[in-house]
Protein backbone atom coordinates (compact mmCIF):
# COMPACT_ATOMS: atom_id res chain seq x y z
CA UNK A 1 0.00 0.00 0.00
CA UNK A 2 1.08 3.56 -0.74
CA UNK A 3 -0.03 6.52 1.40
CA UNK A 4 -0.20 9.94 -0.29
CA UNK A 5 -0.37 13.06 1.83
CA UNK A 6 -2.36 15.69 -0.10
CA UNK A 7 -0.98 19.14 -0.71
CA UNK A 8 -2.94 22.14 0.50
CA UNK A 9 -3.92 24.75 -2.08
CA UNK A 10 -6.50 27.49 -2.55
CA UNK A 11 -8.52 28.17 -5.69
CA UNK A 12 -10.64 31.30 -6.01
CA UNK A 13 -10.73 31.56 -2.22
CA UNK A 14 -11.77 27.92 -1.66
CA UNK A 15 -9.24 25.90 0.38
CA UNK A 16 -8.63 22.39 -0.93
CA UNK A 17 -6.55 19.29 -0.33
CA UNK A 18 -5.27 17.60 -3.51
CA UNK A 19 -3.85 14.06 -3.28
CA UNK A 20 -4.08 13.39 -7.03
CA UNK A 21 -2.13 13.78 -9.19
CA UNK A 22 0.99 13.06 -7.14
CA UNK A 23 4.56 12.22 -8.05
CA UNK A 24 4.12 8.75 -6.55
CA UNK A 25 0.79 8.08 -8.29
CA UNK A 26 -0.60 9.78 -11.39
CA UNK A 27 -3.92 7.91 -11.55
CA UNK A 28 -6.12 5.34 -9.82
CA UNK A 29 -8.32 3.62 -12.36
CA UNK A 30 -9.76 6.47 -14.48
CA UNK A 31 -9.27 9.02 -11.66
CA UNK A 32 -6.52 11.49 -12.57
CA UNK A 33 -7.46 14.36 -10.26
CA UNK A 34 -8.96 14.49 -6.77
CA UNK A 35 -9.84 17.65 -4.84
CA UNK A 36 -11.25 17.74 -1.34
CA UNK A 37 -13.02 21.08 -0.98
CA UNK A 38 -12.57 21.70 2.72
CA UNK A 39 -15.33 22.87 5.06
CA UNK A 40 -15.66 26.59 4.36
CA UNK A 41 -18.08 29.12 5.82
CA UNK A 42 -18.78 31.95 3.39
CA UNK A 43 -19.96 35.24 4.88
CA UNK A 44 -22.99 37.02 3.37
CA UNK A 45 -21.95 38.62 0.11
CA UNK A 46 -19.26 36.03 -0.57
CA UNK A 47 -19.06 32.55 -2.08
CA UNK A 48 -17.15 30.33 -4.44
CA UNK A 49 -16.94 31.62 -7.99
CA UNK A 50 -15.02 29.54 -10.53
CA UNK A 51 -15.31 31.56 -13.71
CA UNK A 52 -15.74 30.18 -17.22
CA UNK A 53 -12.92 27.81 -18.18
CA UNK A 54 -12.32 24.95 -20.66
CA UNK A 55 -11.86 21.17 -20.51
CA UNK A 56 -11.02 18.34 -22.90
CA UNK A 57 -10.61 14.59 -22.54
CA UNK A 58 -12.16 14.10 -19.10
CA UNK A 59 -15.32 13.94 -17.04
CA UNK A 60 -15.77 16.05 -13.92
CA UNK A 61 -17.84 14.76 -11.00
CA UNK A 62 -18.86 17.09 -8.18
CA UNK A 63 -20.32 15.62 -4.99
CA UNK A 64 -21.18 17.74 -1.94
CA UNK A 65 -21.42 16.80 1.73
CA UNK A 66 -22.67 20.29 2.61
CA UNK A 67 -23.83 23.29 0.61
CA UNK A 68 -24.92 23.92 -2.96
CA UNK A 69 -23.27 24.80 -6.27
CA UNK A 70 -24.71 26.28 -9.46
CA UNK A 71 -23.36 24.51 -12.56
CA UNK A 72 -23.58 26.12 -16.01
CA UNK A 73 -21.87 24.93 -19.19
CA UNK A 74 -21.51 25.60 -22.91
CA UNK A 75 -24.09 22.89 -23.69
CA UNK A 76 -26.72 25.16 -22.11
CA UNK A 77 -26.98 23.25 -18.82
CA UNK A 78 -27.93 25.38 -15.80
CA UNK A 79 -28.30 23.23 -12.72
CA UNK A 80 -28.34 23.80 -8.96
CA UNK A 81 -26.53 20.88 -7.32
CA UNK A 82 -27.51 20.01 -3.75
CA UNK A 83 -25.89 17.98 -0.99
CA UNK A 84 -25.70 14.28 -1.90
CA UNK A 85 -26.33 14.83 -5.61
CA UNK A 86 -23.98 14.16 -8.53
CA UNK A 87 -23.03 16.74 -11.14
CA UNK A 88 -21.46 14.83 -14.05
CA UNK A 89 -19.94 16.58 -17.07
CA UNK A 90 -18.09 14.88 -19.91
CA UNK A 91 -15.92 17.31 -21.84
CA UNK A 92 -15.25 15.44 -25.08
CA UNK A 93 -13.37 17.57 -27.60
CA UNK A 94 -14.27 20.94 -26.04
CA UNK A 95 -16.52 22.24 -23.29
CA UNK A 96 -16.57 25.24 -20.97
CA UNK A 97 -18.33 25.61 -17.64
CA UNK A 98 -18.65 27.58 -14.43
CA UNK A 99 -19.43 26.48 -10.88
CA UNK A 100 -20.36 29.02 -8.22
CA UNK A 101 -22.35 29.58 -5.06
CA UNK A 102 -26.01 30.24 -6.01
CA UNK A 103 -27.03 33.89 -5.78
CA UNK A 104 -29.45 33.46 -2.85
CA UNK A 105 -26.84 31.64 -0.77
CA UNK A 106 -24.26 34.26 -1.66
CA UNK A 107 -26.58 36.93 -0.26
CA UNK A 108 -27.30 35.08 2.98
CA UNK A 109 -24.01 33.30 3.58
CA UNK A 110 -23.39 29.56 3.21
CA UNK A 111 -21.19 26.59 4.02
CA UNK A 112 -19.48 24.34 1.46
CA UNK A 113 -17.80 20.95 1.80
CA UNK A 114 -17.36 18.34 -0.90
CA UNK A 115 -15.25 16.56 -3.47
CA UNK A 116 -14.50 17.03 -7.11
CA UNK A 117 -12.75 14.41 -9.20
CA UNK A 118 -11.68 14.18 -12.82
CA UNK A 119 -11.89 10.89 -14.70
CA UNK A 120 -9.84 10.55 -17.88
CA UNK A 121 -11.97 9.55 -20.85
CA UNK A 122 -11.06 6.40 -22.78
CA UNK A 123 -9.23 7.18 -26.03
CA UNK A 124 -12.39 6.29 -27.96
CA UNK A 125 -14.27 9.14 -26.19
CA UNK A 126 -11.58 11.81 -25.93
CA UNK A 127 -12.75 13.62 -29.05
CA UNK A 128 -16.44 12.85 -28.73
CA UNK A 129 -19.36 15.14 -27.93
CA UNK A 130 -19.77 16.79 -24.55
CA UNK A 131 -22.47 15.68 -22.15
CA UNK A 132 -23.98 16.78 -18.83
CA UNK A 133 -26.24 14.93 -16.42
CA UNK A 134 -27.50 15.60 -12.90
CA UNK A 135 -28.39 12.79 -10.52
CA UNK A 136 -30.58 13.26 -7.45
CA UNK A 137 -29.44 11.89 -4.12
CA UNK A 138 -32.23 9.32 -3.95
CA UNK A 139 -31.19 7.88 -7.33
CA UNK A 140 -27.83 6.71 -5.94
CA UNK A 141 -28.03 3.16 -4.55
CA UNK A 142 -27.27 2.56 -0.87
CA UNK A 143 -26.37 -0.44 1.27
CA UNK A 144 -27.00 0.15 4.97
CA UNK A 145 -26.27 -2.82 7.21
CA UNK A 146 -24.66 -3.55 10.58
CA UNK A 147 -23.48 0.02 11.14
CA UNK A 148 -21.94 0.43 7.67
CA UNK A 149 -23.53 2.65 5.04
CA UNK A 150 -22.21 2.57 1.46
CA UNK A 151 -23.51 4.89 -1.25
CA UNK A 152 -22.36 4.23 -4.83
CA UNK A 153 -21.64 7.68 -6.26
CA UNK A 154 -20.47 6.38 -9.65
CA UNK A 155 -19.63 3.01 -11.16
CA UNK A 156 -20.20 -0.26 -9.35
CA UNK A 157 -19.10 -2.28 -6.35
CA UNK A 158 -20.44 -3.90 -3.17
CA UNK A 159 -23.40 -5.23 -5.26
CA UNK A 160 -24.41 -1.63 -6.08
CA UNK A 161 -24.47 0.18 -9.45
CA UNK A 162 -24.82 3.96 -9.83
CA UNK A 163 -26.86 5.51 -12.69
CA UNK A 164 -24.04 7.98 -13.49
CA UNK A 165 -22.97 7.27 -17.12
CA UNK A 166 -19.29 6.47 -16.58
CA UNK A 167 -17.22 5.65 -19.68
CA UNK A 168 -15.09 2.80 -18.28
CA UNK A 169 -15.17 0.40 -15.31
CA UNK A 170 -15.30 2.71 -12.28
CA UNK A 171 -15.62 2.54 -8.50
CA UNK A 172 -16.59 5.62 -6.49
CA UNK A 173 -18.25 4.84 -3.17
CA UNK A 174 -18.97 6.91 -0.08
CA UNK A 175 -18.50 4.90 3.11
CA UNK A 176 -19.79 5.75 6.60
CA UNK A 177 -18.86 3.38 9.41
CA UNK A 178 -19.90 3.36 13.06
CA UNK A 179 -17.30 2.75 15.75
CA UNK A 180 -16.02 -0.86 16.00
CA UNK A 181 -17.39 -1.97 12.63
CA UNK A 182 -15.30 -3.75 9.97
CA UNK A 183 -15.52 -3.85 6.17
CA UNK A 184 -13.74 -6.16 3.73
CA UNK A 185 -12.72 -4.24 0.61
CA UNK A 186 -13.29 -6.73 -2.22
CA UNK A 187 -11.01 -7.19 -5.19
CA UNK A 188 -13.63 -6.03 -7.70
CA UNK A 189 -11.50 -3.51 -9.61
CA UNK A 190 -7.93 -3.54 -10.86
CA UNK A 191 -6.96 -0.31 -9.08
CA UNK A 192 -8.37 1.14 -5.84
CA UNK A 193 -7.58 3.84 -3.31
CA UNK A 194 -9.15 4.94 -0.02
CA UNK A 195 -9.48 8.58 1.03
CA UNK A 196 -10.36 9.18 4.68
CA UNK A 197 -12.41 12.33 5.22
CA UNK A 198 -12.87 12.00 8.98
CA UNK A 199 -12.42 9.46 11.76
CA UNK A 200 -9.89 6.93 12.98
CA UNK A 201 -9.45 3.83 10.82
CA UNK A 202 -7.12 0.87 10.50
CA UNK A 203 -6.46 -1.00 7.27
CA UNK A 204 -5.28 -4.55 7.92
CA UNK A 205 -4.27 -3.38 11.38
CA UNK A 206 -2.29 -0.35 10.24
CA UNK A 207 -3.57 3.14 11.16
CA UNK A 208 -4.79 5.32 8.33
CA UNK A 209 -4.12 9.03 8.58
CA UNK A 210 -7.27 11.16 8.17
CA UNK A 211 -7.27 13.16 4.96
CA UNK A 212 -4.77 10.93 3.23
CA UNK A 213 -5.11 8.76 0.12
CA UNK A 214 -4.12 5.12 0.53
CA UNK A 215 -3.49 3.33 -2.77
CA UNK A 216 -4.29 -0.35 -2.27
CA UNK A 217 -2.12 -3.16 -3.57
CA UNK A 218 -3.74 -4.75 -6.66
CA UNK A 219 -5.40 -8.05 -5.84
CA UNK A 220 -5.45 -7.51 -2.08
CA UNK A 221 -8.68 -7.63 -0.06
CA UNK A 222 -7.82 -5.63 3.05
CA UNK A 223 -10.09 -5.23 6.06
CA UNK A 224 -11.07 -1.72 7.10
CA UNK A 225 -11.74 -1.25 10.84
CA UNK A 226 -13.40 1.85 12.31
CA UNK A 227 -12.10 3.04 15.68
CA UNK A 228 -14.59 5.94 15.78
CA UNK A 229 -17.38 7.15 13.56
CA UNK A 230 -15.69 7.30 10.15
CA UNK A 231 -16.32 8.88 6.78
CA UNK A 232 -14.34 7.89 3.66
CA UNK A 233 -14.56 7.36 -0.08
CA UNK A 234 -13.21 4.48 -2.13
CA UNK A 235 -12.18 5.20 -5.74
CA UNK A 236 -10.83 3.04 -8.53
CA UNK A 237 -11.60 1.09 -11.65
CA UNK A 238 -9.85 -0.35 -14.67
CA UNK A 239 -6.37 0.93 -15.48
CA UNK A 240 -6.22 3.66 -18.12
CA UNK A 241 -5.83 2.53 -21.72
CA UNK A 242 -2.45 4.24 -21.95
CA UNK A 243 -0.69 7.20 -20.30
CA UNK A 244 -2.32 10.61 -20.03
CA UNK A 245 -0.90 14.12 -20.15
CA UNK A 246 -2.46 16.78 -17.94
CA UNK A 247 -1.92 20.48 -18.53
CA UNK A 248 -4.03 23.10 -16.77
CA UNK A 249 -7.64 21.93 -17.36
CA UNK A 250 -6.83 19.62 -20.23
CA UNK A 251 -6.29 15.83 -20.20
CA UNK A 252 -5.26 13.89 -23.29
CA UNK A 253 -3.44 10.78 -24.49
CA UNK A 254 -1.84 12.84 -27.29
CA UNK A 255 0.15 15.99 -26.33
CA UNK A 256 -0.89 17.55 -29.66
CA UNK A 257 -4.50 17.68 -28.44
CA UNK A 258 -3.40 19.74 -25.44
CA UNK A 259 -1.39 22.11 -27.62
CA UNK A 260 -4.42 22.60 -29.87
CA UNK A 261 -6.73 23.20 -26.90
CA UNK A 262 -4.38 25.77 -25.37
CA UNK A 263 -4.16 27.64 -28.68
CA UNK A 264 -7.93 27.59 -29.20
CA UNK A 265 -8.74 28.86 -25.70
CA UNK A 266 -6.13 31.60 -25.95
CA UNK A 267 -7.59 32.68 -29.31
CA UNK A 268 -11.19 32.66 -28.04
CA UNK A 269 -12.09 29.83 -30.42
CA UNK A 270 -14.11 27.83 -27.89
CA UNK A 271 -17.74 27.10 -26.98
CA UNK A 272 -19.01 29.62 -24.44
CA UNK A 273 -21.37 29.39 -21.47
CA UNK A 274 -24.59 31.29 -22.26
CA UNK A 275 -24.85 34.55 -20.33
CA UNK A 276 -21.26 34.41 -19.05
CA UNK A 277 -18.64 37.01 -19.96
CA UNK A 278 -15.84 36.55 -17.45
CA UNK A 279 -13.42 33.71 -18.03
CA UNK A 280 -10.18 32.33 -16.64
CA UNK A 281 -7.39 33.16 -19.06
CA UNK A 282 -4.83 30.62 -20.17
CA UNK A 283 -1.82 30.58 -17.81
CA UNK A 284 1.36 31.74 -19.48
CA UNK A 285 3.31 28.65 -18.48
CA UNK A 286 2.87 25.60 -20.75
CA UNK A 287 3.31 23.52 -17.57
CA UNK A 288 0.43 25.21 -15.75
CA UNK A 289 -1.02 23.33 -12.79
CA UNK A 290 -4.51 21.90 -13.22
CA UNK A 291 -7.32 23.82 -11.58
CA UNK A 292 -10.40 22.27 -9.98
CA UNK A 293 -13.99 22.72 -11.12
Image (spheres, rainbow, N blue to C red):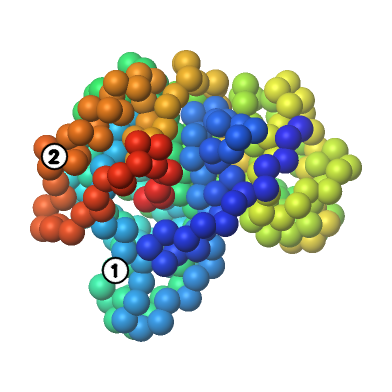
Position above or below: 106 against 187: below
Q: Picture coordinates of residue 262 (x, y %)?
A: 25, 35
**Depth check, front residue: 240 or 170:** 240
- Vertical order, 258 against 214 (above or below): above
Q: Please tell me which residue is depicted at 43% across the width and 39% down the height of the picture.
A: 118
Residue 200 numbered mark, or none: none
The crowd level at tag 2 (other Cα within 10 Å; few <14, some 14-19, many 20+) is: few
Residue at 49%, 40% in the rendered image: 33
Which disc is residue 102 wearing? 1
Q: Give the total of numbered labels.
A: 2
> Which of 180 and 260 lies nearest the eye of the viewer?
260
Q: Are marks 2 and 1 in contact (CB under 8 Å)?
A: no
Which residue is pictured at 78% across the width and 57% down the height? 200
Residue 246 lies left or right of residue 142; in this view the side is left
Residue 292 lies, with reference to residue 256, above or below; the image says below
Dot 2 falls on a residue whose secondary structure is helix
Place of residue 212 in the rendered image (x, y in percent of width and height, measured from the top left): 68, 49
Q: Can residue 169 be seen in this view?
A: yes
- Which disc is residue 267 wearing? 2
Q: In this view, does 56 lie to the left or right of 142?
A: left
Image quadrant in which the N terminus is located: top right
Q: Residue furthest front?
A: 284
Towards the viewer: 9 or 225: 9
Coordinates of residue 11 in the picture (x, y in percent): 42, 59
Amino acid sequence: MLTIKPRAEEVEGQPILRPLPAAQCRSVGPFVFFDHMLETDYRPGTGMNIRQHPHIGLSTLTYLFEGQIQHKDSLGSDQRVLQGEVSWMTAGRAIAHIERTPDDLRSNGSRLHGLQVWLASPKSHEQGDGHYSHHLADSLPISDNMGIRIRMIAGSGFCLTSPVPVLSPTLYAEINMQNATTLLIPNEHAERALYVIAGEMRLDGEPVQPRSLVVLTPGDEPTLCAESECHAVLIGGAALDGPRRMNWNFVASDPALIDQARARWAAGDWPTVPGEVERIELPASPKAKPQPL
